[in-house]
Amino acid sequence: MNEDSPRIRRLGAEEAARRNTELAGLLIDCVEGGASVGFLLPVDRERTGAFWRMVAEGLAAGTRILLVAEDRADGSLLGTVQIVLGQPENQPHRGDLSKMLVHRRARRRGVGAALMNAAEEAARSAGKTLLVLDTSTEEAERLYERAGWVRTGTVPGYALMPDGRPGRTTFFHKHL
Ligand SMILES: CC(C)(COP(=O)(O)OP(=O)(O)OC[C@H]1O[C@@H](n2cnc3c(N)ncnc32)[C@H](O)[C@@H]1OP(=O)(O)O)[C@@H](O)C(=O)NCCC(=O)NCCS
């Protein structure tokens, strides 16, 4: 670890609610950068803020884990990732890795990899033995493969890209 490495922390419901604007800003940055993460352009504070309020509710209910990567110098938000713990009763062992987001200004210096390590560790600690995720981003596909995830398959036209064009979505899984 050095001064440049991000600080990875778990956020509770209260802090997530307090940092709603910052989290919304990160999500907006990623969508405006072309990431297909549930939103279409033009993306705004209202919809992204509502998304993070829903996440804070999940944190309060214990159905999610939220991790953030922060700049060690000023505490600013560099990236985030979630594990969705709440699953149907026949899938208690499974979690979904969701909303892996790194701000464009902080990319390509290992923030994504650090978040991925911490997310897997958190899922393991929560008793999960299988993680699943889906992505439409090539950079993310490379990150997941480096972390030992298995490419399960690709569904053409599964979701729209931020500009409204249909995109392909690739599913990955990892047994922990
Ligand atoms: C996918 C994403 C999370 C990756 O985040 P990141 O912090 O840039 O990831 P890393 O830094 O760990 O790895 C990215 C690249 O930087 C390289 N890298 C890592 N540390 C580096 C360093 N110190 N110096 C130079 N390169 C480095 C990695 O090898 C990797 O290279 P590659 O793209 O050629 O494979 C980020 O691009 C993102 O947020 N995208 C938009 C949102 C999105 O689509 N998320 C996925 C939704 S499922």
Image (cartoon, rainbow, N blue to C red):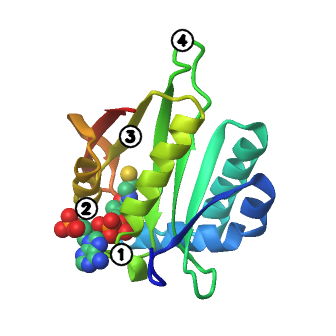
Badge 3 density bin: few <14, some 14–19, many ≥20, Cα 10 Å = many
The image position of residue 118, as x and y in percent, is 49, 53
Residue extending farthest top = 90
Amino acid carrying mark 2 in the image: Glu
Q: Mark 1: is the Cβ under 8 angstroms from ligand 1?
A: yes
Q: Earlier in the sequence, mark 2 or mark 4?
A: 4
Query: Tag on residue 133?
Result: 3
Q: Which residue shows up at 63% across the image and 80% down it?
A: 75
Q: Mark 2: is the Cβ under 8 angstroms from ligand 1?
A: yes
Query: Tag on residue 90?
Result: 4
Q: Nearer the viewer, residue 36 or 40?
A: 36
Q: Earlier in the sequence, mark 2 or mark 3?
A: 3
Q: Mark 3: is the Cβ under 8 angstroms from ligand 1?
A: yes
Query: Tag on residue 107?
Result: 1
Residue at the spot of label 2: 139
Say whether residue 79 is left or right of residue 65. Answer: left
Q: Earlier in the sequence, mark 4 or mark 1?
A: 4
Instruction: State the CA–CA distance, disc 4 to disc 1.
Output: 37 Å
